[in-house]
Amino acid sequence: MQKWREWQTASDSDWNLALEQEAVIRFLAEQTRLTRASVDQAAQQLRLSRGTLYRLLHRYRQRPQTSSLLAWKRGRVSSSHRLCATAPNDAGPTLRIEAQKFLYTI
C-alpha cells in the first residue's frame, strides 16, 4: 500500500507546512549524528513532539522529498477487500466451526 501522498493532492496550507518542516528536517537529515539538544530545538521550532519529529525524519531520509512530509493517506486502499473473492458470502458458520475445532484442541 502506497502511503505517500502526491504533492498535487495537497492543499496550500498542507504544502506550506511541509515546506516549513523540510527546511528544519533537511538540516537534521544531513547530520551523521543527532544530539538530543538539536532534536529538541527542532521539535520546539516545528511545534512537534520528539517522537513525531523522529518519524518525519525517518520518512524524509527514506525519500528526501517535500511530499514525504505530507500527512499519509489513512485506511485501506480503495481497491482492497476485507474478504477474498472466493470466500462464501456468509463466512460466519465456517468461522464458528473452525473456532470450535481450535478450542477443542487446546
Image (tube, grey):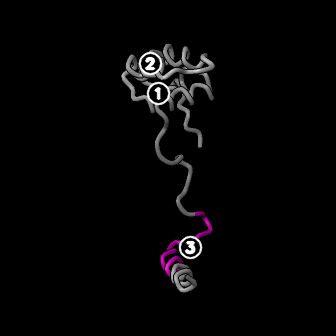
- Magenta region includes residue 20: no
Q: Earlier in the sequence, mark 2 or mark 3?
A: 2
Q: Residue at the location (49% across, 38% down)?
A: 73
Indicate which disc, 1 or 3, sits on the residue closer to the N terminus: 1
Among the 4 quarters of the image, the one containing residue 17 = top left
Residue 86 image point, x, y percent: 62, 68
Task: Tell me how far mark 2 sits from mark 1, CA to CA.
Answer: 8 Å
Q: Which residues are magenta?
A: 84-96
Image quarter (top left, top right, bottom left or bottom right) of the C terminus: bottom right
What's the amino acid at mark 3? Pro
| Residue 86 lies in the magenta stretch | yes
Quarter of the image containing the N terminus? top right
Report the residue marked by disc 3. Answer: 88
Q: Which residue is located at x 55 percent, y 21 percent?
A: 34
Q: Residue at x 48, y 23 (%)?
A: 36
Asked if the residues shown at circle 1 and circle 3 are in contact, with their CB atoms under 8 angstroms apart, the answer is: no
Q: Secondary structure at mark 2?
A: helix
Which residue position holds label 2?
Answer: 42
- Which amino acid lies under the numbered mark 2 shown in the image of this protein? Ala
Residue 53's tag is 1
